[in-house]
Amino acid sequence: MPEPDDVRRSPAVRRARRRTVAGWVAVGLLAVLGLVAVGLGVAARTVWLPDDEVSASARTAGGGTEPQLVVTAPGVLETRPGPVTATATSPDGGPVVLVLGRETDVTAWTDGVPTAVVGGLEAEASLAVEPPAAAAGDVPVPDPAASDLWAQVAEGEGSATLELDPPEGRWLLLAASDGTAAAPEEIVLTWPQEVSAPASVPLLAGGGAALLGALVLALVHRRTSRRRHQRALAGAGGPVAPAHDPEHEQAPVPEHQQEHDHEHGGGRRGASPWAPDRSSDEETR
């Protein structure tokens, strides 16, 4: 039902409309806040979650004398807790050998041989490398894979990977070729790391609660805003929509019953179809 201009411009109606708009704005802000919190919670567990591994590499070539062997310094394998995965690569596709041995055995194997020593972390993902000292003459190096001194051995063409979980004691990693060519040019050590996103749980829970609150608030505000608008119209003298009461609404009378009432009841309106017909009794009297 259209509202007259004077009613629409009345202070009560305008105030009711302003409160309605403010309520919907609050609902929208709460919903946006919930969506942002849920999005941040999901991002914290996916996009912003750090890797479950951390790696550090060492370049052994380019230091003058080409090393025939590469070893890790004591304690390097224990830089981070947990098992470590070692990978050695040779750019020319030559044979690569990785072994895990006790410090005394590895030290004796490298005695007098040009050896590069991989030290600790010098940057976030870079290991320090001490180049080999010049050795007098050509020193033959036996193939490390042929020895039974080692606890673990891995071989490959171009690269080799060894899953290391050293037992108690002082253990070193030794990388070489077949004993005649230069040592691998790159060593990569990879450790596992525990990752977690503690902020994601409160963000997801808070965002879900905010979205649920926005839904409940929207339903409540929809009902209260209608009632507020009707009261404002009534106070301003405007037309008010009649209240709908389904309990007192009269059910429609079937068409065949209407014809029956018209023939026997003189077309009485509003007569119950189950009421007794007294017209025949009156005629008999």
Image (cartoon, grey):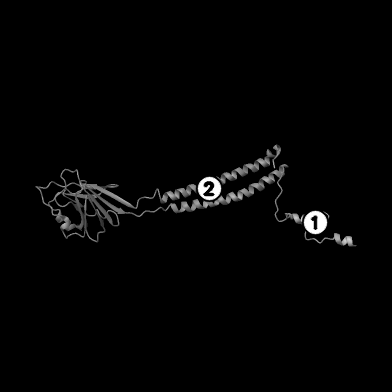
- Residue 31 numbered mark, or none: 2
- Image coords of residue 261 (percent x, y): 80, 56
Q: Could you say which is closer to the camera, residue 46 or residue 156? A: 156
- Residue 193 numbered mark, or none: none
- Image coords of residue 262 (percent x, y): 81, 54
Q: Residues within 10 Å of mark 2 (few under 14, many from 20)?
A: many
Residue at image position (51%, 47%) is 33
Total marks in image: 2
Which of marks 2 and 1 precedes in the sequence? 2
The reply to whether callout 1 and callout 2 are in contact (CB within 8 Å) is no
**Which quadrant of the figure contains the N terminus?**
top right
Q: Nearer the viewer, mark 1 or mark 2?
A: 1
Give the spatial CA distance, label 1 vs label 2. Answer: 58 Å
Q: From the viewer's perspective, tell me whether residue 128 is left or right of residue 51.
A: left
The part of the image, by quadrant, that contains residue 167 is bottom left
Residue that protrudes farthest toward the right in the picture:
285
Q: From the viewer's perspective, tell me whether residue 228 is left or right of residue 61.
A: right
What type is the residue that disc 1 sits on? Asp
What type is the residue that disc 2 sits on? Ala
Q: Could you say which is closer to the camera, residue 208 or residue 124? A: 208
- Image coords of residue 241 (percent x, y): 70, 46
Residue at image position (17%, 56%) is 145
Residue that protrudes farthest toward the left in the picture:
137
Residue at image position (26%, 52%) is 189
Residue 4 to residue 270: above or below: above
- Image coords of residue 285 (percent x, y): 90, 62
**Element type at marker 1?**
helix
**Element type at marker 2?**
helix
Q: Mark 1 — residue?
A: 261
Q: Residues within 10 Å of mark 1 (few under 14, many from 20)?
A: some
